[in-house]
Image: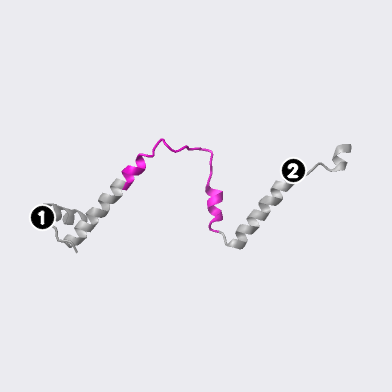
Amino acid sequence: MVNLELDDDLIEAVTKLSGLKTKQEAVTQALQEYIQRHKRASILQLFGTIDYDAGDDHRPERALHSLTPAERQAWHDDQKIIAEAAVLPESPWEKQA
């Protein structure tokens, strides 16, 4: 517990605007909002520093995280089969045609 001498007008304004009932709730809310605002500002500093590929679609990979381990393994097995089918040599019958 910390005892602080705070401006009563500021505390009253926060409690009226927020609908909070106690000074402690008002101060806690104000501090949380202050922290969030500064975190958002620090994230904005990253703007333009991270490469972005508009064609990169993360949704299929993200969907894998919602699968059970068995479903995830089945998906990976299917992907291997698809990849192997793409590099299969031509059959001898296709060469004669």
Q: Earlier in the sequence, mark 2 or mark 1?
A: 1
Is residue 55 on the magenta stretch? Answer: yes
The magenta segment is 39-66
Residue at screen point 60% across, 58% down:
72
The picture places residue 39, in percent across and down from the top left corner, at 32, 47
In this rendering, position of residue 92 left or right of residue 8: right
Residue 50 found in image quarter: top left
Residue closest to the far bottom? 1
Residue closest to the far right? 96
Residue 70 found in image quarter: bottom right
Label 2 sits on what residue type? Val
Q: Secondary structure at mark 2?
A: loop
Q: CA distance from mark 2 to mark 1?
A: 75 Å
Label 1 sits on what residue type? Asp
Q: Which residue is mark 2?
A: 87
In this rendering, position of residue 50 left or right of residue 69: left
* Residue count near mark 1 (Cα–Cα under 10 Å), binned few <14, some 14–19, many ≥20: few
Is any atom of residue 97 visible in this view?
Answer: no
In this rendering, position of residue 3 left or right of residue 92: left
* Residue count near mark 2 (Cα–Cα under 10 Å), binned few <14, some 14–19, many ≥20: few
Q: The N terminus lies in which quarter of the figure? A: bottom left
